[in-house]
Image: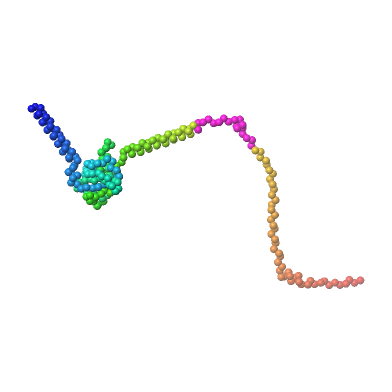
Amino acid sequence: MKRSAIETILGAIVLLVAGFFLVFGYKTANVSAGANGYSLIANFSGIGGLKAGDDVQISGVKVGTVAAVSLDPETFLARVHMMVEDSVQLPVDTAALISSESLLGGRYLALEPGADEEIIQPGGTIQYTQAPQNLEQLLGQFIFSVSEDKDKDAENEEEARGGEAVASAPAAPVTAEESTPAPAPEVVEQAPVEVAPEAVPAEEAPPPQETPAAEETQNEELPQPDVTPAQP
């Protein structure tokens, strides 16, 4: 009898603990709010492990739940169906982003409402979406960039060392023949050559002009002197 009573008490304690966890999980998942909300659709190029039951948050506050995830056969994009609370009215320029809860994993769908006055109707589609960042790709890019920087630094160091080696190399010995300066060429002085000045043609004097008075004096006959014969 004592053993059966102990087993009964332990069983009751297990049932109480299970009921407590069931109520706690129900409140945390907010199943009732998701069932009473309206549905929305968002298409992503990649969901990064997002699954049904994950949270839909706005500014870190849960406002809905991811209902289902499927593949669009026409566009081959991941289609996410979500349930959002009726009290949350989202503008048509709202953006949907898939974010990580921590580095260890866990995804949630974050909504960033816009400023448009028009509201998305139930069953509508969120036009602006952003796929999650792949941590492995980011780490690979970072490691690759670091390795490239190291290679460039090594090349620069080798070039600098090569320049220092060339600068520190000893100069070749100079022989006696090379050290003696070459004789300067003799400079022969030439006598200056006198250049005769060029004859400048004299200007021709204009012919004298004969005045009419001179012509008249020439034409006049000079008087001949009287010659008397000498007496014997």
Q: Nearer the viewer, residue 21 or 61?
A: 21
Colour convention: rainbow
Query: Is 183 on the left-hand or right-hand side of 132?
Result: right
Q: Nearer the viewer, residue 151 or 35?
A: 35
Q: How many marks?
A: 0
Q: Position of residue 188 (x, y in %)?
A: 67, 40
Q: Kindly identify the residue that appears in the image at 61 percent across and 31 percent down.
A: 177
Q: Nearer the viewer, residue 42 or 169?
A: 42
Query: Is 126 on the left-hand or right-hand side of 168?
Result: left
Q: Kindly identify the residue that appears in the image at 18 percent across and 42 percent down.
A: 31
Q: Position of residue 65 (x, y in %)?
A: 22, 43
Q: Is residue 115 visible?
A: no
Q: Is residue 48 visible?
A: yes
Q: Nearer the viewer, residue 213 or 190?
A: 190
Q: Position of residue 160 (x, y in %)?
A: 46, 34
Indicate whether 24 appears above or below 36.
above
Indicate whether 8 appears above or below 88.
above
Q: Kindly identify the residue that appears in the image at 61 percent across and 30 percent down.
A: 176
Answer whether residue 145 is magenta in the image. no
Farthest left residue in view? 1
Q: Quadrant of the N terminus?
A: top left
Answer whether residue 170 is magenta in the image. yes
Q: Kindly identify the residue that appears in the image at 22 percent across and 47 percent down.
A: 39
Farthest right residue in view? 232
Query: Is 1 on the left-hand or right-hand side of 32?
Result: left
Q: Quadrant of residue 103?
A: top left
Magenta region, residue range: 166-184
| Magenta stretch secondary structure, dominant | loop
Q: Quadrant of the C terminus?
A: bottom right
